[in-house]
């Protein structure tokens, strides 16, 4: 029987690259997103679930569907978004949605799946951000969600390590995805001044291939050179 992975944000960017890699590694992949369909990744072992992760009650309502699969051994929390504006320019709705998608949803899904992950000695991978590690102008809200998720994962590892469950934090630097579509800046065009979504999938594969008994708990992935492009 194939192992099952849940990947949030599997409809695009980093989450999709990870989902595609897991399919190559013979996982059955359940991908979660608002716009996800079977055609997102046309693969017989890919199952899409449409869910708006900003709606915590909708996340809780996934439980009966997820509970039915006792082969779940991997949860990848990749869904997320960022807005980088002066804090007073953000709306209360944006604050509520970003906390819900970037922080509450990963903690709620972990809460629902932890018994199954313990039974299967599974892995939780949280995609945070380089902004979880530093303090940048216009990033107070985003950094709060990402450093919160990092703290959650690190404390949870101490709680569950004896059960054979690993909890991994990946902190990516700027990665060439749709993340920047609604932002005033984007990644640099040079290949060595940006990350590719596949780089993060490579990291996930490395984590999953590591020796049982050795736990990689955090990875920070950066482009060799710094780069950014401003939109006019
Ligand atoms: P992306 O291409 O915009 O992907 C974001 C994903 O999150 C999409 O699949 C989207 O799915 C999902 N998502 C957003 N809001 C959602 C909601 N309300 N409900 C359900 N799903 C939702 O950007 P990405 O770069 O791959 O981002 C993936 C993760 O990496 C995010 O957590 C981001 O914070 C993190 N990250 C990105 C970068 C970067 O430079 N790109 C750097 C560090 C960390 P739907 O639109 O289908 O809902």
Image (tube, rainbow, N blue to C red):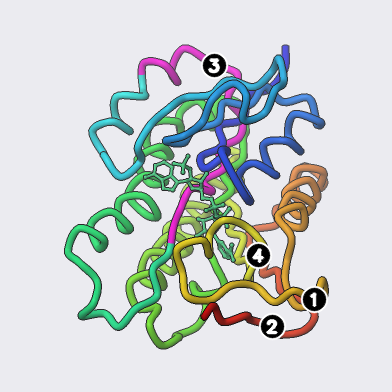
Q: Position of residue 159 (x, y in %)?
A: 46, 50
Give the CA separation, mark 1 to mark 4. 12 Å
Residue contact between numbered discs 2 and 3, judged by CB atoms under 8 Å: no
Question: x and y percent of residue 83 in the render?
Answer: 38, 68
Question: Distance of mark 1 from mark 2, alpha carbons?
Answer: 8 Å
Lower sequence index among marks 1 and 2: 1
Q: Which residue is denoted by mark 4 in the rendering?
A: 175
Q: How far apart are the two marked residues, 2 and 3, measured between alpha carbons?
A: 44 Å
Q: Which residue is mark 3?
A: 70
Which-is-in-front pick, marks 2 and 3? 2
Identify the element where label 2 is drawn. loop
Most foreground residue, 165 or 23: 23
Tell whether label 2 touches label 1 (CB within 8 Å). Answer: yes
Residue at coordinates 68% horizontally, 64% vertically from top-left? 219
User: Disc 4 to disc 2, how far (Cα)?
Assistant: 11 Å
Ligand 1 within 8 angstroms of badge 4 C-beta: yes
**Bounds of the magenta segment:** 64-81
The residue identified by callout 2 is: 227
**Mark 4–mark 2 contact, CB under 8 Å?**
no
Q: Which comes sooner in the sequence, label 4 or label 3?
A: 3
Question: Going 33% across and 72% down the picture, which residue do you hit?
Answer: 141
**Mark 1 sits on what residue?**
190
Q: Earlier in the sequence, mark 1 or mark 4?
A: 4
């Amino acid at each position: 029987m194939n192992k099952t992975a849940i990947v949030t944000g599997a409809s695009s960017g980093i989450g999709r690259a990870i989902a595609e890699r897991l399919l190559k590694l013979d996982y059955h992949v359940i991908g979660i997103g608002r716009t996800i369909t079977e055609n997102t990744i046309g693969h017989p072992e890919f199952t899409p679930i449409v869910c708006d992760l900003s709606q915590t009650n909708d996340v809780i309502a996934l439980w009966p569907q997820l509970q039915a699969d006792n082969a779940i051994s991997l949860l990848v929390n990749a869904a997320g978004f960022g807005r980088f504006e002066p804090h007073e320019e953000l709306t209360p709705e944006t604050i509520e949605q970003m906390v819900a998608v970037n922080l509450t949803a990963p903690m709620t899904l972990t809460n629902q799946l932890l018994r199954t992950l313990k039974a299967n000695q599974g892995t939780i991978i949280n995609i945070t951000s380089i902004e979880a590690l530093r303090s940048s102008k216009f990033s107070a809200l985003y950094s709060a969600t990402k450093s919160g998720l990092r703290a959650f994962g690190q404390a949870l590892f101490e709680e569950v390590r004896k059960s054979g469950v690993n909890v991994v934090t990946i902190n990516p630097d700027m990665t060439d995805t749709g993340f920047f579509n609604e932002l005033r800046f984007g990644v640099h065009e040079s290949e060595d001044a940006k990350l590719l979504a596949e780089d993060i999938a490579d990291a996930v594969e490395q984590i999953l291939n590591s020796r049982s008994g050795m736990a990689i708990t955090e990875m920070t992935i950066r482009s060799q050179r710094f780069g950014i492009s401003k939109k006019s």
